[in-house]
Amino acid sequence: MRMTIVTMKHPLLTSLSLAALVGTAFGQPVAGPVSSAAPLALVTTVRAQDPAADKNPEIAAKIEKAKGLWGDRKGAKDADVIAVIDELNQVYKTCGPKDKASIVSFLGKTFELKRDEVSEGVPNNKIMLAAAVSLGEMGSEAVKTLEAWIDHKTLRKDLALQSRLILSLGKTKDAAATKTLIKLLEHKDAPLVSAAAQGLGEFDKVDLKIRKDAFESMLKVLMSALNTKDSNPQDLIAKDRYDVIASPIITSLGKLSGHNERDPQEWQRWWNKNKSKDWDKAE
């Protein structure tokens, strides 16, 4: 049985544009849009696969095709590689465990690619952003790969990509990922703290103890940033850090607790009163 998937506008490229917006919002320029040479319409024929089946030769062929397009540091065929990443993303959930592992491994390899900057300070990271977006859709199987590249020394300066990796780690909704996200709340770069807080907001359905641990950690970071800002109104760095992290933390506090506040002090009072209660019982 075969099925045809037609995507008039590349869905992954749409996600990639969102990742670019995240980067520019943090003041970190991201490589420009995918080349106009990229196909506007992509017609992909893939074989529907029994979930129990595995080692599909079509999956292996797509991976090898993408590797053959990696090319040199200029990345002239990067748009074509992204198209293959999208194809693999679309069929991932129908794959067996070995094919899933092959896809995740392939996506992990994209973070090893070397690309020349588009211009000074502007990374050519389109493939990596696309891979990071896809990994976020792949659940528990992608957690170790995402964690391996978060704060990796070769990618550390690319805050847009780091933010995307962190957000995707949250998107996996694997409760084990909360440990890494909680550690990232102490990161020196405020945009990554913001991403970690947003990632933790994805875990509103996990065990209550995990939610409370994440809630308490975020609240401590929020109150510390607030106290630092208020103790020295002339400290613009402290003010900027607070401004970047406050809103995403407050939003995620609401998601994890099912309660709504906007004032940090009110959140602290709520926590003091409710930290030992069962948040899942109606008040």
Image (cartoon, helix red, strand yellow):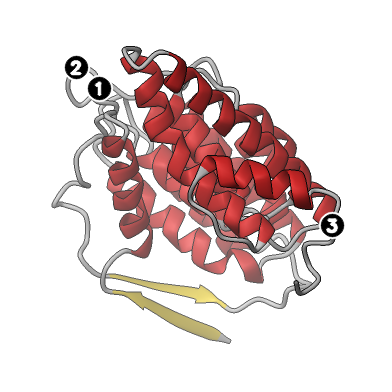
Residue 141 appears at what percent x and percent y?
Answer: 71, 50
Q: Earlier in the sequence, mark 1 or mark 3?
A: 1
Label 3 neighbour load within 10 Å: few <14, some 14-19, many 20+: few
Q: Secondary structure at mark 3?
A: loop
Q: Quadrant of the N terminus?
A: bottom right
Residue at image point 58% right, 46% down: 266
Residue wearing tag 3: 277
The quarter holding residue 22 reads top left
Label 2 neighbour load within 10 Å: few <14, some 14-19, many 20+: few
> Against 277, is 76 above or below?
above
- Badge nearest the viewer, 2 or 3: 3
Q: Secondary structure at mark 1?
A: loop
Residue 120: image tag: 2
> Against 26, is 154 above or below?
above
Residue 117: image tag: 1
The answer to the question of whether label 2 and label 1 lie on touching residues, with beta carbons closer than 8 A, is: yes
> Against 232, is 254 above or below?
below
Q: Is residue 138 visible?
A: no
Label 2 amino acid? Glu
Residue at image point 27% right, 29% down: 27
Residue at image point 36% right, 64% down: 11
Residue at image point 37% right, 50% down: 82
- Badge nearest the viewer, 2 or 1: 2
Q: Nearer the viewer, residue 30 or 209?
A: 209
> Against 133, is 48 above or below?
below
- Badge nearest the viewer, 1 or 3: 3
Label 1 amino acid? Glu
